[in-house]
Image: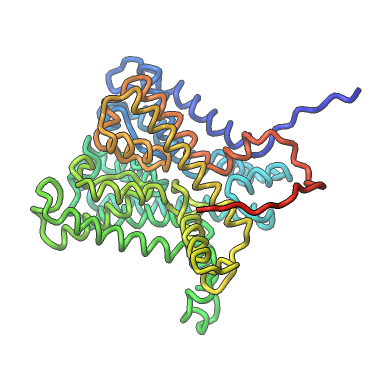
Amino acid sequence: MVKKRFTISTTHIILFSFLGAILVGTALLCLPICSASGKATPFIDALFTATTSTCVTGLVVAPTISAWSFWGQLVILLLIQIGGLGIITIMSGIMVLFHKKIGINDRLLLQDAFNLNSLSGLVRFIKKVIKGTFIVEGVGALLYMLVFVPQFGLKGIWISIFTAVSAFCNAGIDVIAENSLCNYATNPIINIVTCLLIILGGIGFIVWWDVLRVLKQPRPKRRHLFRHLSLHSKIAITATLVLIVVGALFIMLFEYNNPLTLKEYSFFDKLQISIFQSITTRTAGFATIAQENLTDSSAILCLLLMFIGGSPVGTAGGVKTVTFVVIISSAVACVRNQSDTNIFGRNITKAAISKALTVVFVSFTIVFISTVLLSLVCDASLLDILYETVSATATVGLSRNLTFSLNSLAKLVIIATMYLGRVGPISLAIAFNFKKQNPDLIKEPTEEISVG
């Protein structure tokens, strides 16, 4: 009798790598040296902080600036960087640095971690990702220093580095103040640098290299940059710009005369605050206005922006812009009775549409279940609870001042939600699919049903 060998898939390794980082981070954050008070941090709070950092979410049970010592903040920063790039990416980068050979299993891990369609050029891709990440974060930190060093002195260097990494990784955790970036709501430098870091991290590494590829082409091609981009880049860039502009316009409209948010500001300041809110809701988590002061209309709009999130193969969360566009385009094609889904003159495969539907369904399921569970163990309004669960699922980090008041059971619900949201709907679907992957040699008969 032949015994079955137990095999673990690349998807399981990715899931366990995030879990391992969270547990190690929790153990470190429990140490008295990491606490600002010098006392051991309760396990549930350390677990929550390690999870929100590794999952680059940004929901915190206590202000990072006052709850953690320098060493605690350093652990949080390392977890953010690990979570933003992924443990598999960082380990592969270390192997490349020491000229270690990356085998086929490692390449498969990288392919799954970045959700790529090919194994070709993976090592080169990893090198560019790590190099590009540190360059962008470094430039962002230098620009932040223009504001933070004059204000905080040498401490401003640490604040600048922490904020740059957190913004690029779309984490939204800061060590500036207890009210996030609200003190800098009208500071153009902070607004512009933070927004650019969020967008660059969230747009996806594939788009970076595609734009650079076209820019390196002869001048005639550079004149028509958009035309020569890949379909993926066209969708990601277009969707990102549309969501930023439309989101900002509606937020400004809804909040224009709200005395708790925009009413007292000048038109220019209202505009930059609205743009920042539109960008940060798509998984960054920084705030220049208190989220609990938003009108219900703005809060509902932000729920949609959070759920959509950033673009694939980046540091952002959510169901992703490309997924959202594919779903909308597929629905439009169905309404028009078209057999094919067409975007920018290209047909979308049925497999891509099915994958997009799966991502949205699993994400919606996570939001629904976590909302029900949180409402059972937490006494708060439905809008505040929904804001919290969508924020956790899409790894955004914005809260209507609910996170600080969560009890232990509620914290566990959000911890699980952040983890499930970060590892991704597709990874979850694959991880919990125990059916042996054999091609279907015999297909069941087809029968028409009524839908809608």
Q: Tell whether 259 sits left or right of 427.
A: left
Question: Residue 365 location in percent, x, y?
Answer: 47, 38
Question: Residue 425 location in percent, x, y?
Answer: 53, 42
| Position above or below: 340 against 404 | below
Q: Tell whether 370 sits left or right of 255.
A: right
Q: How was this image coloured?
A: rainbow
In the image shown, does 92 or 342 lie closer to the viewer?
342
Q: Could you tell me which quadrant the N terminus lies in?
A: top right
- Residue 68 can be seen in this image: yes
Q: Residue at x 65, y 43 (%)?
A: 109
Q: Which residue is drawn at 25% across and 39% down?
A: 176
Q: Which residue is drawn at 47% across and 49% down?
A: 319
Question: Residue 6 location in percent, x, y?
Answer: 75, 28
Query: Which quadrant of the figure has residue 35?
Result: top left
- Residue 78 can be seen in this image: no
Q: Tell whether 447 sits left or right of 340.
A: right
Q: Tell whether 30 sits left or right of 387.
A: right
Residue found at the far bottom of this picture: 220
